[in-house]
Image: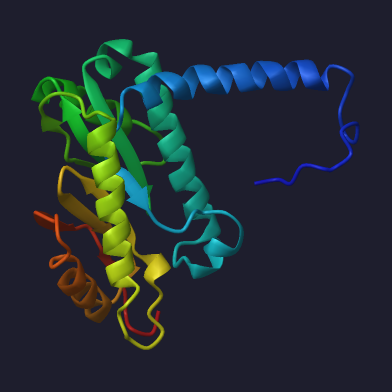
Amino acid sequence: MPSVPNDPHHGRSVAGPRLAGKATALLAGLLIPLLLQGCAAVVVAGVATGASVAHDRRSAATVLADDTIELQAMKLLYEHPDIAARSSISINSYNQVALLTGQAESSEVGRRFADLVARLPKVKTVVNEVGVGPSAGLTEASKDLYLASRCKLAIASIKIPDFDPLRVHVVSSAGKVYLLGLVTSEEAAAVVEEVRYVPGVVQVVKLFEYIDKTA
């Protein structure tokens, strides 16, 4: 992400503050309706900016593509209020595989959104894990955040040479834990072994992509 100069007038036209205000309002208009849905699934992983990119086995271009997919998918929800009003869907993209979690009033609502996401230009695959049920509230979202945090803590205890826990992305939704990342088979087995014994985990879903040990 480009840095912002400290000088408030550097590199800006006179209309800069006005445009910034409009951009902020537009972003708020996009994000607030989505946040009010109480999306339950939470991803706990190193953010794809700054120093954390050094921990990632994805290329910088792929990290950017994943960020773009998530933003575009959120925009799709905003542009389709009929879907947003009948669901609480979260989107997490890793290596251009879009994982959809959360709840919808019907399987048809979930499928409709999955079809829209699949048409985004950078998406390779959509994993539709949206369940049928009432939209999750803040209590459920907090539970998912707590569970994902505990899973990350457990993963951090793994003692494998050159293993970096920040390379494993954890998404939690209603007790199901989804594991994403570019890992070796040895790393994957160790991660699953730790996560499956975390209290509150009802199911572990492996969405890993496997690499050679030398990668």
User: Which residue in the rendered view is the most extreme toward the front?
Assistant: 139
Q: Quadrant of residue 5?
A: top right
Q: Quadrant of the C terminus?
A: bottom left
User: Which color scheme is applied?
Assistant: rainbow
Give x and y (percent) for residue 10: 90, 36
Viewer-side residue, 67 vs 201: 201
Q: Quadrant of residue 133?
A: top left
- Where 85 falls versus 156 (above or below)? above
Horizontally, residue 193 falls left or right of residue 14, namely: left
Give x and y (percent) for residue 69: 42, 38
- Where 93 falls versus 134 (above or below)? below
Q: Residue at x 23, y 31 (%)?
A: 114
Q: Residue at x 29, y 51 (%)?
A: 146
Horizontally, residue 67 falls left or right of residue 210, namely: right
Viewer-side residue, 95 vs 190: 190
Give x and y (percent) for residue 50: 61, 58
